Image (cartoon, rainbow, N blue to C red):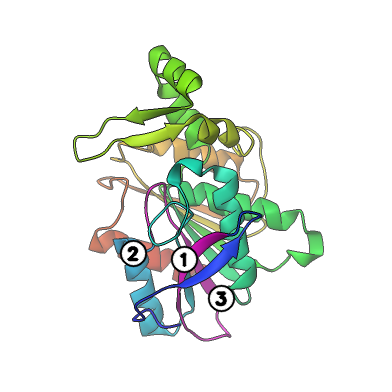
Amino acid sequence: MNDAADRPQTLSVGADARPIALRLTDGAANKPGVLWCGGFLSDMRGSKAEALAQWGRANGRRIVRFDYSGHGESGGNFEHGTISRWAEEALAVLDTVCIGPQIVVGSSMGGWIALLLARALATRGGAGAGKLKALVLIAPAPDFTEELMWKAMPEDVRAVLLHDGKWVRPSEYGPGMTITRGLIEDGRQNLVLGTPFAVGCPVRILQGVADPDVPWQHALRLVSCLAEDDVVLTLIKDGDHRLSRAEDIERIIAAIEDVT
């Protein structure tokens, strides 16, 4: 399928057959493919994902991007979403659509999803070996439901979340963000920080020091947990959470080319 098509491809995932929308930029089979994993409440038509697809077209690289259930062009209710469900969808796309070794590019929550992909492939032993070429993580937010949400919530907000099953975080820019008890509790089943772990491939991390959503210290904590020699963290002094400026896009592409 070409990116210019009006409609994305759809992949059915899970026991409930969630329709997951994806877009494919064709490229050379002799170069590692790139799988884009977006962030929480983001979609595959965002500026970084679109820039990655444009780079793929210009350089003959196969790019796969998709929307989690409840996001973008995919079906499903956002409030039913959990880290486990979204990781299951990412793994299904990797297994079904991606060809050969992949560079998984994870933005924000997508960084957590990328790490869970590496964990899932490791459990397959030889069957998963060689599927990951590298990880490129942009403002990665592993464990964010616990470290950056739950632990930051006042007691009264936690009480509402536990009693009602959800809490709507107000926003100045439109409808509030709904945080569910299911998201928080499921997140605890997928924590990756705390003890060293290996992902089995090179890792490149780009993190803005001026990021108001994921502190740069969070990236340092991740680096301390990665039991790999080939891990490079790039701190961008004036970078925010999105890292979508032209110079940020250049850094992301450079990190992908570095591990190709």
Q: Which amino acid does label 1 sit on?
A: Ala
Residue 180 pos. (x, y %)? 47, 32
Q: Which residue is drawn at 47% across and 52% down?
A: 76
The amino acid type, in three-letter code, at marker 2 is: Arg
Give the residue at mark 1: 21
Which x, y percent locates residue 50? 33, 68
Q: Residue at x 45, y 41 (%)?
A: 79
Kindly give the residue lying farthest to the right in the view shown.
126
Magenta stretch contains residue 34: yes
**Where 11 falls versus 211 (above or below)?**
below
Q: As rendered, which of 158 and 246 lies closer to the eye?
A: 158
Q: Name the residue under label 2.
A: 45
- For the residues labelled 1 and 2, the Cα–Cα distance comes to 11 Å
Secondary structure of the residue carrying tag 2 is loop
Q: Which of marks 3 and 1 is in front?
A: 1
Q: How far apart are marks 2 and 3 (CA)?
A: 22 Å
Mark 1 secondary-structure assignment: strand
Front tag of 2 and 3? 2
Label 3: which residue?
32
Q: Residues within 10 Å of mark 2 (few under 14, many from 20)?
A: some
33 relative to 210, above or below: below
